[in-house]
Amino acid sequence: MQPAICTGMAQQQPSVQVHHLGTEKEPLVVIDGFSGRAEALLEAGYRADYRPGGASYPGIRALADPGYLDLRRELMMQVMAQIFGVKRGIRCEASTYSLVTLAERELSPLQRIPHYDHSGEDLIAVMHYLLPPDSGGTAFYRHRRTGFEAITPEREDAYGAATTEDLREFGEPPARYHFGDDERYEMIGAVEARVDRLILYRGRQLHSGIIPAPDQLSDNPRDGRLTINMFLFGT
């Protein structure tokens, strides 16, 4: 994926890239070296209290303190204003340590295909990677039958009907973590994990976590695919 904008900052400061995905050109912001304290965030994640992540999430989650975003408050406000059109403040709706744990055979049909978090344009999803590339990044998709890359409120009914038609024509998706192209979806971009890399994108984007070694997933945060996930809203 080629960045539309690439801005390098001073040494030991975060570096920022802005990509525009697919034909709909939705923004994906990639910030490397975001916090400068990945080890401390990992240690806090090791001690966190994990619970089932809910019906849609294939793993477990624990509360994560989002206060460290204030370390880069000016940068975050610039990104939210210039890229996502947020002109006033930011409200953090959720902040969790997340561990993907489910074996592929245990995935529900909806967990086997790309998903979107929220159809409104005001929800910005944040993924903060704390581990190296082999832990797996995030991929973004276009739905072939509709051509949709982002699911807006106006598209939700049509997308739901089209996925029902996918099920009728192709059957249930295979029991695996989705990655790459198939008869339902086309991959339009991907970002790899890097230690202390934070990415932001609208929650309406179709996306899926990249799970390179499903047989090595663990519910032990010291061994598993540990990330921090947040949902931000403009106020």
Image (cartoon, helix red, strand yellow):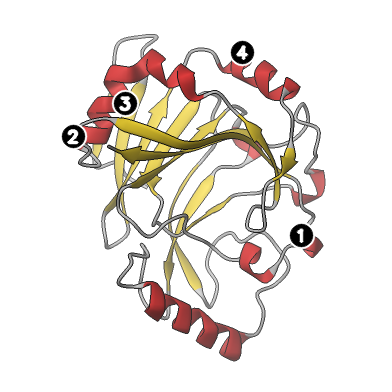
Residue at 36% in and 13% down:
13
User: Which residue in the protein does label 3 denote?
Assistant: 76
User: Which residue in the protein does label 2 denote?
Assistant: 87
Give the amino acid type for the residue marked by disc 3 in the picture.
Met
Residue 34 in view in this figure? no
SS class, disc 1? helix
SS class, disc 4? helix
Packing grade of label 4 (10 A; few <14, some 14-19, many >=20) is: few
Q: Earlier in the sequence, mark 1 or mark 4?
A: 4
Badge number at residue 40: 4
Q: Earlier in the sequence, mark 2 or mark 3?
A: 3
Packing grade of label 3 (10 A; few <14, some 14-19, many >=20) is: some
Give the amino acid type for the residue marked by disc 4 in the picture.
Ala
Identify which residue, 10 or 209, lies in the foreground. 209
| Location of residue 159 (image quadrant) | bottom left
Q: Is 73 rendered above or below residue 31?
A: above
SS class, disc 2? loop
Badge number at residue 104: 1
Residue at 60% in and 19% down:
41
Give the amino acid type for the residue marked by disc 1 in the picture.
Glu
Label 1 to label 4: alpha-carbon separation: 31 Å
Residue 34 image position (x, y, % from top left): 43, 21
Give the amino acid type for the residue marked by disc 2 in the picture.
Lys
Residue at 67% in and 79% down:
172
Residue at 58% in and 66% down:
113
SS class, disc 3? helix
Label 2 to label 3: alpha-carbon separation: 12 Å
The C terminus is located in which quarter? Answer: top left
